[in-house]
């Protein structure tokens, strides 16, 4: 292991870029999936359309999506925005169903109680349904986060720099060490994303611990 | 651009020969089918066994999560560099790439099969035992059919993953539709690259559609409620545990 100490700076800056390319789409995707998931719950007819539509988007292999987006959007092929948009599409595709199912998991009695207490639809959604759906949504978000981190590495094939660059770099020189460092860094980054989401979920769902506290 | 893609795709010369679309399509489907089939032969029995006996649950739960985070491109390169020099000729990249495809396809199928059996209504299992069925009979006649929806969604996830990974495997010399993307990128032939991307996307969608239809017709009517005309409970309210489609390539 002599390669890593010499290239620590490079690996760190690639990690930062990787975090950005995988993390920003996660937030954007969640923000877009929330209203879509709500719509799918609110209007039952929309549910199958949204689920099938986003499911179809999800089937597109990442390399194909990375290549098609610049042509559809008119961006440059090397523009990292393509990767951010592609990852956002995958995140939405995973989360719309999760959000709809999460909102569906809120007991009817709870919704009716909230309505009886005078909550209007909008406020009921924000302060009753959404918080109670957090555990389900968080489970979907964790899957999206982990797969985003690993899919982003494919972007090296279209020339966008991130941890995947270590793969092509190592392969072109038939040198395994950068590849191993890249794989390990990707897995660690996925663990960090997972940990952050778990932590945020714990903070957002204090009632889940309340029952377990010794009384 | 759309016109240039259409022009490229409708050019008869691009469909024929050793590097034509037809040949590449057959290769792509061939690799994917082989890999998913081998993976299913390993993962379905293993998942059923683990779900039935409850042995090794921790293993399945962890391996599915861990596998999702391993970047397939890195795995592909490592396999080629490690195994390639030990083999010669075409198999020097065919075997390592195929191995990676199989390895990537196993976790989703395994966790689908396991979760499917795990999620079978205990009452159904008890009823089967009460009717005098033995362990293997319960597995074959009750648990397997009940687990089929999740097994199928595991296979669908695995297939998407394999089709996507087979595409990027063109970078290490594998055939298939990925060739158009990788070669097109290398020589900056945009119409070829874009057409390849469109072909791969359409292939993935069609294959997923076929599997979705297969799932519809394989799963017992007793589970799906198809053909049932009597008003039953509102299926919209008790959605089954959402199988999470996944691919990481």
Image (cartoon, coloured by chain):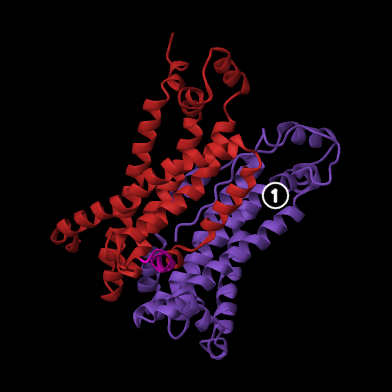
Q: Residue at x 16, y 56 (%)?
A: A8
Start and end of the magenta stretch?
A66-74
Foreground of the two, B75 or B228:
B228
Q: Residue at x 62, y 65 (%)?
A: B207
Tell me: B27 left or right of A72. right
From the image, which quarter does the C terminus of chain A lie in? top left
Residue A102 on image: x %, y %:
54, 34
Q: Is residue B84 above or below residue B225?
A: below
Q: Residue at x 38, y 37 (%)?
A: A197
Q: Was residue A68 drawn as part of the magenta stretch in this picture?
A: yes
Confirm whether residue B93 shows in the render: no
Foreground of the two, B34 or B170:
B170
For the colour red, the matching chain is: A
Foreground of the two, B151 or A146:
A146
Residue A104 on image: x %, y %:
59, 32
Q: Residue at x 44, y 42 (%)?
A: A141
For the colour purple, the matching chain is: B
Residue A185 on image: x %, y %:
29, 53
Residue B179 on image: x %, y %:
45, 79
Dot 1 corresponds to which residue?
A: B148
Q: Quadrant of residue A159?
A: bottom left
Q: Was residue B181 drawn as part of the magenta stretch in this picture?
A: no
- For numbered disc 1, what is the local secondary structure? helix
């Amino acid at each position: 292991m002599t390669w890593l100490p010499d290239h620590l700076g490079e690996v760190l800056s690639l990690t930062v870029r990787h975090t950005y390319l995988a993390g920003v789409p996660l937030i954007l995707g969640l923000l877009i999936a929330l209203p879509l998931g709500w719509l799918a719950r609110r209007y039952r007819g929309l549910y199958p359309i949204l689920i099938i539509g986003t499911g179809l988007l999800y089937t597109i292999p990442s390399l194909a999506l990375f290549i098609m987006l610049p042509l559809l959007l008119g961006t440059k092929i090397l523009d990292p925005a393509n990767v951010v948009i592609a990852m956002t599409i995958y995140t939405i595709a995973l989360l719309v169903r999760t959000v709809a199912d999460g909102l569906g998991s809120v007991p009817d009695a709870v919704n009716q109680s909230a309505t009886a207490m005078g909550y209007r639809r909008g406020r009921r959604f924000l302060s009753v349904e959404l918080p109670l759906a957090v555990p389900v949504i968080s489970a979907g978000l964790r899957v999206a986060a982990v797969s985003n981190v690993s899919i982003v590495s494919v972007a090296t094939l279209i020339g966008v720099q991130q941890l995947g660059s270590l793969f092509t770099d190592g392969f072109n020189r038939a040198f395994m060490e950068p590849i191993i460092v890249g794989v390990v860094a990707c897995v660690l980054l996925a663990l960090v994303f997972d940990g952050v989401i778990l932590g945020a979920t714990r903070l957002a769902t204090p009632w889940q611990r309340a029952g377990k506290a010794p009384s | 651009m759309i016109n240039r893609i259409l022009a490229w795709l409708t050019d008869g010369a691009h469909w024929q020969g050793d590097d034509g679309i037809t040949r590449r399509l057959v290769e792509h489907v061939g690799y994917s089918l082989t890999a998913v089939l081998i993976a299913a032969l390993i993962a379905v029995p293993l998942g059923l066994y683990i779900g039935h006996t409850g042995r090794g649950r921790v293993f399945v739960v962890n391996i599915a999560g861990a596998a999702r985070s391993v970047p397939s491109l890195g795995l592909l390169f490592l396999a080629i560099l490690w195994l390639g020099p030990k083999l010669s000729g075409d198999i020097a990249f065919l075997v390592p790439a195929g191995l990676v495809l199989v390895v990537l396809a196993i976790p989703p199928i395994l966790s689908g099969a396991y979760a499917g059996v795990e999620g079978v209504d205990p009452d159904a299992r008890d009823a089967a035992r009460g009717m005098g069925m033995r362990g293997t009979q319960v597995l074959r006649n009750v648990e397997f059919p009940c687990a089929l929806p999740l097994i199928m969604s595991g296979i669908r996830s695995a297939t998407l993953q394999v089709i996507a990974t087979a595409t990027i495997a063109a970078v290490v010399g594998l055939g298939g539709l990925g060739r158009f993307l990788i070669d097109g990128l290398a020589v900056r032939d945009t119409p070829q690259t874009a057409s390849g991307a469109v072909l791969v996307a359409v292939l993935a969608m069609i294959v997923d559609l076929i599997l979705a239809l297969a799932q519809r017709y394989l799963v017992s009517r007793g589970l799906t409620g198809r053909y049932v005309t009597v008003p039953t409970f509102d299926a919209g309210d008790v959605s089954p545990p959402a199988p999470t489609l996944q691919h990481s390539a």
